[in-house]
Image (cartoon, grey):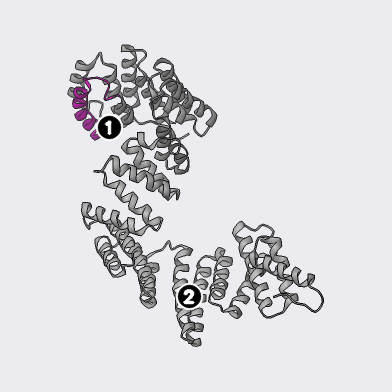
Amino acid sequence: MKAIKYLVSGALVLSMSVAANAQVADYNTMLEPIMKELKANPNDKNAAKDLLKNYNKVFKKDPEALTALGNAYLTVKNYEMANHYADLAIAKKKNYGNAYILKGDIQAMQDDGGGAAMWYRQSVELDPKNPQGYMSYANVYRKIDPAESERMLNELKKNVPDFPIEAEAAHSFYSTGNYEKAMEYFLKSDISKLEENHLTEYSVAATSVGNREKALEVAKAGISKFPENISFVRLALINTIGLKQYGEALGYAEKLINKEGENNSGDLGYYGQALAGNQRYAEAISKYEKALSVDPTNIMPYKYISDAYNDMGQEDKALEYSAMYLDKNPNAKLSDYRDIADIYANKIKKAKEAGNTADVDANFAKVVGVYDQVIAKYPQAKVWGTYQKANTAFSAELDDKATPYFQEVVSLLENNSDRSENENYYLGRSYSLIGYYYWTKNELDTAGQYFDKCVKVTPDDNIAKTWFQKKAEAEAAPSGEATE
């Protein structure tokens, strides 16, 4: 078991004890230069010798100060001295919980989960009003025995009812990157009672798992409670953009830039998206270009500029910047290629409206080329790429071009007994639209065969449902009559 999964750092233990008595400021002041010496010379047994002598003389009877010094040794992985000062603290006050927590942290740092849990348990038993013992013990068992972890958290709630247990549990998961689990606990907490750091973590976690409504709600609470913390404005901006609430987003963007200036590439990118969402495309492009000048390594503005030009109807400029984005992005996603294909789809639409068949064919060939490029680079995406070709053609009412690609999807999938949910969708949709193609040509027997296959894979397909409804009406109509 890795220590990082459950270790409560010495710094946290130290910070929890800071407010305990008036002598804290004194020992913290004396501890600071000791910490610097220990970090600078972690393997020197005589490091900070004179400073330590004076510290021990002043605080030899203070378990809190002794534990703090033990935590200082823990930070440089001097387990022997950390343990020595934990023992001194216990000798001065046998029920001082933070000293037992320090001993547990020492074991945790050495990947001894069982030993760590034993010391945390002693902290709980001897100092039942100290919440950190409960939290540390629960963290040890969080993955190996969730029921035991939950039991200890319930003990904490019973013995220290005012402790923000849900927020602290959420913080533990957040600190290990488990945002889904962090959200479970944050959602149980009272936003109005959360501290600044918990509100920040809550909004970030909600953003990360895609719960933008909650992320925005929490960010707004943070803005109200801690107006000087600009990170809440940034989180509100990010999530109003995600929710396409562009009018509100623009207000947050202007507040952020007025406070921080135009020296952060990411902030400028968000500002540009807020402007673009309000159809202020030229201003948006200006901000994206500024973002590129501030940080040339941030390639996202190329994509944003492409999107802006596409929304302005300038597809050729959009394609120019899309090409730059892909050229600079070795980790391009499938959706990035689809975005380029969509630009060509816009050109197809314009060419059809102008009656220019040659341009329709040329731009559809470009769409096919984009997806062929994807398939060559990511062979596992062949079904996806083939379906996208078909779907682009069908959306552009190029049914004769769409149907062969839908049939290719069918040939790739229908004999595969281990299809994913997405593959079932592609197969069912392909059956449906091939059936629709033959229905429009009045080749009803062939259409029926595809719709029969469709409902076995995707029984709720609307086109298939309409087909069977019309077929039933036709069969029920008196001889010589026809249904529409």
Seen at 47% across and 72% down, the residue is: 341
Give whichever of 251, 326 is nearer the camera.
Answer: 251
Q: Is residue 57 left or right of 472 when viewed as pictured?
A: left
Q: Which residue is mark 2?
A: 345
Type of the residue with mark 1: Pro
Q: Earlier in the sequence, mark 2 or mark 1?
A: 1
Kindly report the secondary structure that dominates the magenta region of the rendered protein.
helix
The label shown at residue 246 is none
Q: Is residue 72 something one can see in this rendering? A: yes
Residue extent of the magenta highlight: 17-42
Give whichever of 155, 334 is nearer the camera.
Answer: 155
Seen at 35% across and 20% down, the residue is: 99
Q: Local crowd at mark 2 within 10 Å, few (<14), some, or many (≥20)?
A: many
Q: Which residue is mark 1?
A: 42
Q: Quadrant of residue 267?
A: bottom left
Residue 239: percent from left, percent from top: 38, 52
Q: Is residue 92 left or right of 51 when viewed as pictured?
A: right
Residue 173: percent from left, percent from top: 43, 38
